[in-house]
Amino acid sequence: MKTHRIARIPGDGIGTAVLDAASAVLDKAAASSGFALESQTFPWSCAFYKETGAMMPADGIETLRGFDAILLGAVGWPAEVPDSVSLHGLLLPIRKAFVQYANVRPHRLLPGVEGPLREGGFDLLCIRENTEGEYSGAGGRVHQGTADEVAVETSIFTRTGVERILRFAFERATERRGKLASVTKSNAQKHSMVFWDEITAQLSGEYPAVEVTSYHIDAMAARMVMAPQTLDVVVASNLFGDILTDLGAAIQGGLGFAASANIDPTRKSPSMFEPVHGSAPDIAHLGIANPMATIWSGAMMLEHLGERDAAARVMTALEATTARGIGTVPGRDRTDAITAAVLEALD
Ligand code: NAD
Ligand code: IPM
Ligand code: MN
């Protein structure tokens, strides 16, 4: 039987519950589609850090390299381990080491989910640069603790990095409705963002079928609330894309619905699939986390692995579940009940 090797990293907080839910659904979809997911679970998390002093073993990246894909729950338990330690020790190094430069985040309403907007007819795909920009980690602090203290966080944008994410976005727009929104803040940030706008203009000549429009990040935030139906593919830098995709989740009805794929388009390294949301410490022990974002991310993983039919069946089961009103209101239905309904819908 065809087998895909999956590295599972549940992480912290609700990460375990949502990942278990997704694995149950994906395993069932695989079994009935004639392939198998051979999964290995890694306990890398803040608890692991407290035991070992590291978020993952020194050879963690090399271990993951042998897998076809990575499925991750969420990382972070800020009450015990600073986010600057946990995220820089696990999630962010995986994205960088495997050059998962395209973070793909779809935003649309599942049937039966109301969402906060008057008009729900939007279907947009955010493409977030995932390896550089504001997340480069360059910078430092001087005169620490004094009145003269200065903190510097340097954004690094390379031509290679900007060009490849824009090309990826132009290609997605070509496959979809032919509209690309490129998001910057070039009125205030006169180096990196002007550079981004220039490369966007240069590439647009190569994609004549795509209508490209540049927006400032502030205006885009308003547009995603006021007129999201005017958007198709939205491409943004690492930080801007991070913020816009929580906004995208919000217009979808909540963070429990927003899926995400960290893709290495060259396929030299494993790609990683995870929900947009985090470990949700505020609800971590209540059993009410919505697993749909992670299940949807799992469907994106199946698609990436070439299992189109199984991916489509998982999405159909998710949609059938929300259409029945299950999982549509944050906090009302239990994780187990939502998962059981999706499993039943797969039959
Ligand atoms: P969060 O996404 O964990 O939670 C924000 C709000 O959304 C909370 O009220 C939470 O209860 C709710 N929420 C999130 N997911 C939900 C779900 N599936 N179902 C129902 N409600 C859900 O963001 P935060 O509180 O800023 O971060 C908590 C921790 O997670 C921090 O350590 C943060 O750094 C980390 N984090 C990790 C990732 C990741 O691993 N990819 C992403 C975001 C945040
Ligand atoms: C996300 C998260 C991460 C990010 C954090 C936890 C570092 O918010 O995946 O959206 O900013 O990339
Ligand atoms: Mn985020």
Image (cartoon, rainbow, N blue to C red):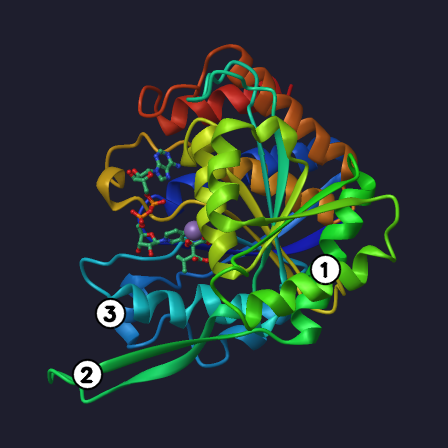
Who comes first in sequence, dot 2 or dot 3?
Answer: 3
Label number found at residue 148 = none
Above or below for 140 versus 73: below
Please identify, in this view, whether the residue under mark 2 or under mark 3 is nearer the observer: 2
Crowd rating for badge 3 (residues with CA inside 10 Å; few <14, some 14–19, many 20+): few
Crowd rating for badge 2 (residues with CA inside 10 Å; few <14, some 14–19, many 20+): few
Q: What amino acid does circle 2 point to?
A: Glu
Secondary structure beneath dot 3 equals helix
Residue under pointer 3: 50
Secondary structure beneath dot 2 equals loop
Residue under pointer 2: 149
Asked where in the image residue 69 lies, by quadrant, the reply is: bottom right
Residue 283 in percent (x, y) is at 25, 37
Q: What amino acid does circle 3 point to?
A: Lys
The residues tagged by marks 3 and 1 sit, at their Cα atoms, a distance apart of: 45 Å
Q: What amino acid does circle 1 point to?
A: Thr
Residue under pointer 1: 200
